[in-house]
Image: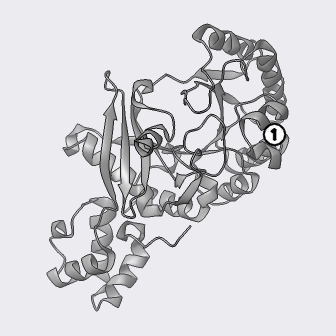
Amino acid sequence: MGPVLTNIRDLDEVKFVDLAVGMGEKAFRGRQLFEWVHAKRVNDYEEMSNLPAKLRESLREEYGAVDPLRVVKKQEAQDGSTAKYLFELSDGNTIESVWMRYRHGDSVCVSSQVGCRMGCRFCASTLGGLVRNLTPGEMLSQVYDIEREQYPKDTDGHIGSIIVMGMGEPFDNYENLIRFIRLLTDEKGRNLSARSVTVSTCGIPDGIRRLAKEGLPVTLALSLHAPDDETRKRIMPIAKAHPMEEVLEACRDYFSETGRRVSLEYSMIRDVNDDEKAAEKLAERCVKLQKSGMPVHINLIPLNEVSETGWERTGTERIQQFKKILEKNRINVTIRREMGSEIDAACGQLRRKTQIK
């Protein structure tokens, strides 16, 4: 992966102050610049009306456009519940983000990398491998741009939660992930509550434990997808390096350190991980976790099918049977509402189809 030029949205207030002073301006100009970029989230230097014209021109020459992304395609679900965005980066690479409308508030699922190297067999993001990491500004721009697109007037609404569950493995881009969250939750900037941020991982114990020490009360989501190591290795290559018990122990540590719930994500794949035996095994493991003091929530996900994998989603009736077995064992379980299947909702699917064309 080659170096990525810094975008102005990568910078926090301290760096903006240093930038302004380095350009011969007073420190307060840096604070003004931070407000324009992250609180007001403007897209053009010309909108920064209280900054000197010379400073605005210098910023344009040094950093290029304020927004490092460009919408190249948008697909919307007929019921208005979901919109999928394909963004082009300044280097020509593309990434995906998804806007979702829920009763409890609107949410955006953002990507953390261009592609992915984790190799999960059900996922389109990993088919072309990892190209590069996203910068904090490129991650933030997915939020800022979708918010501007979905709510053209301030009174129209806003994004209430962010899920880092798009393309890429967040802990494979750890430093940029943390900078993204800190900028997103900065009270002088976008000011989203850290409790409204969910980070999803395929299961990297060191990353889970590092996040627990950051002092950021975000929700952790573990892509579990199997009741045992044998099945998980078939679905997720990461399981060969990190057995399930090692990963779940890190999740227990995360809960102990933060008090924040860990959601266990479980994609339902026909004839792979969806029979009664798998449900009983999963229930047994969850009961054990609960006895250790960690509350368990299982999120059953009807598989978003990707043609290249050959895997199919489990039928509705079988998912309900799976759910009943977990509930019988007093496991908190939900079935994720299906959204966006007609707009290439699976991670990396729209990007993949666009590349093939």
**Position of residue 88 measured from the top left corner of the image (x, y, whole percent):** 36, 54
Between residues 262 and 111, which one lies in front from this camera angle? 111
User: Is residue 125 something one can see in this rendering?
Assistant: yes
Q: In the image, is residue 236 above or below residue 112?
A: above
| Residue at figure coordinates x 31%, y 60% from the top left | 39
Q: Which quarter of the figure has residue 185? A: bottom left
| Residue at figure coordinates x 59%, y 46% from the top left | 126
- Name the side, left or right, on which 29 lies relative to 303: left
Residue extending furthest toward the bottom: 24
- Name the side, left or right, on which 316 lies relative to 289: left
Q: In the image, is residue 48 above or below residue 194?
A: below
| Residue at figure coordinates x 63%, y 57% from the top left | 172
Between residues 187 and 201, which one lies in front from this camera angle? 201
| Residue at figure coordinates x 33%, y 70% from the top left | 34
Q: Amino acid at mark 1?
A: Met
Q: Which quarter of the figure has residue 108? A: top left
**Position of residue 97 measured from the top left corner of the image (x, y, whole percent):** 42, 44
- Name the side, left or right, on which 339 lies relative to 303: left
Q: Secondary structure at mark 1?
A: helix
**Position of residue 332 measured from the top left corner of the image (x, y, whole percent):** 67, 23
Residue extending furthest toward the front: 357
User: Is residue 242 something one can see in this rendering?
Assistant: no
Q: In the image, is residue 159 above or below residue 117?
A: above
- Quarter in which the C terminus is drawn: top left
Question: How many labels sit on residues?
Answer: 1
- Quarter in which the N terminus is drawn: bottom right
Q: From the image, tell me which residue sits under label 1.
A: 244
